[in-house]
Structure formats: structure tokens, C-alpha cells
Image (cartoon, rainbow, N blue to C red):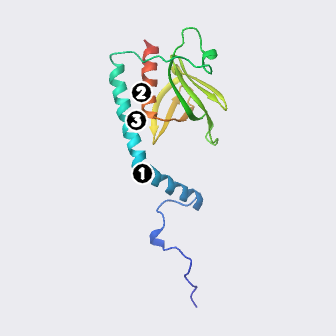
Amino acid sequence: MHAAKRNQDDPTERSARSTEEGPALRDAADILAREERKPGRLLGRLIDEAEAQAARERFQVEPLPVIEPDEQIGPHLAAGEMVHDMRSGATTKPPGGQDALGYGGTLYLTSRRLVHMGQVFLTVMLADIVETSLAGDRLLLSLRDGEGLTLDVEGPRLLRAHIAAAMQELRG
């Protein structure tokens, strides 16, 4: 006697990914992969990359622009510290926080550090950043002590160019 085959998936249509983590994670990965391929997301990445390239070229001949500090960051600035960029709606995973969902808030790039203010207050000195890289639309920072930081922000490529310019200016 053979078992009925109703309600069974066709094995040729199953995802080629491992299901060790279970079907929920596999399905979430499939949804994320589809979202990544949407035209709007691709266009956003292309615009971000074009803006970042233009900024890198501009910073070779002129300094990083300074913006007026708002009431949130103003009291936390040291004498002579300037604000170069601000990103609201930033999500960060602090060093050692691989299991955390992340913390929302506003990210500031100053002449000396990155400051995340919101659910938590987090400061990373620019001198402690060893490397910046991108993973999709996430900005990854490798820090001097071997830790890392993940930033989910609008325009991560442009922010990366701003961080590089601020680090260059800091080094003199």
C-alpha cells in the first residue's frame, strides 16, 4: 500500500538552501531575496552609489561640509567638535550584540566620532574604526578592539564616504 501524495510539496520546487534553521527562516530568507531584487531597491542603491562617488570626488578638493547641530546632539559635543552628517531612523547593533534586534535612533557623524542617540546612547570614536564595509544595505564597522558594529541607515554608501572623509580629516 502506498501513502497518498496530497498536500506534499514537489521536491523539485523546494528551496536549494539548507533548512537546518527551519522553514520559517528559509521562507524569511526567500522573501528577503525577492525584496532585494525589486526595481525600487536597486534604483535606490544605484542612486546611493552615485552620490557616494560624487562625494568622494568632491572631498578630494574640498572639506566635508559642516551642519548645524540640533538640540539633541548639541549638548554632547566637545569644544571644537563639528557635526558632518545626521541620519534619523538609524538602527544599530552595538559591539557584541549579534543576538540583539538592534536599537533605533538618530545617528550623528561628528569630526571625532559616530554618536547614536535613541533607545541607547552609543559613541564610537572615529580613531577606533579600522574598516568599513557594506553587506547589502547595511554598513559594517570593524573596530580596533576586534568588535564590530552594524548600521542600518538610509544611504549607507554615502554615509560610508562621509565617514572616510571625516577619518581622513581627523588624521590630518
User: In percent of the image, x 52 and y 14: which residue is there?
Assistant: 82
Please tell me in which quadrant of the rendered image residue 51 appears: top left
Asked if 23 appears above or below 82 in the picture, the reply is below
Q: Which residue is mark 2?
A: 161
Q: Earlier in the sequence, mark 1 or mark 2?
A: 1
Q: Is residue 58 left or right of residue 78?
A: left
Q: Cα distance, mark 2 to mark 3?
A: 11 Å
Residue 22 in sight: no
Q: Which residue is mark 3?
A: 48
Asked if 80 appears above or below 134 in the picture, the reply is above
Residue 122 in sight: yes
User: In percent of the image, x 41 and y 41: which residue is there?
Assistant: 44
Q: Quadrant of the N terminus?
A: bottom right
Label at residue 38: 1
What is the x, y in percent for residue 16?
46, 62
Q: Cα distance, mark 1 to mark 2?
A: 25 Å
User: In percent of the image, x 38 and y 43: which residue is there?
Assistant: 43
Nearest-to-viewer mark from 2 and 3: 3
- Amino acid type at circle 2 is Ala
Mark 2, other Cα within 10 Å: few <14 / some 14–19 / many ≥20: many
Q: Cα distance, mark 3 to mark 1?
A: 16 Å
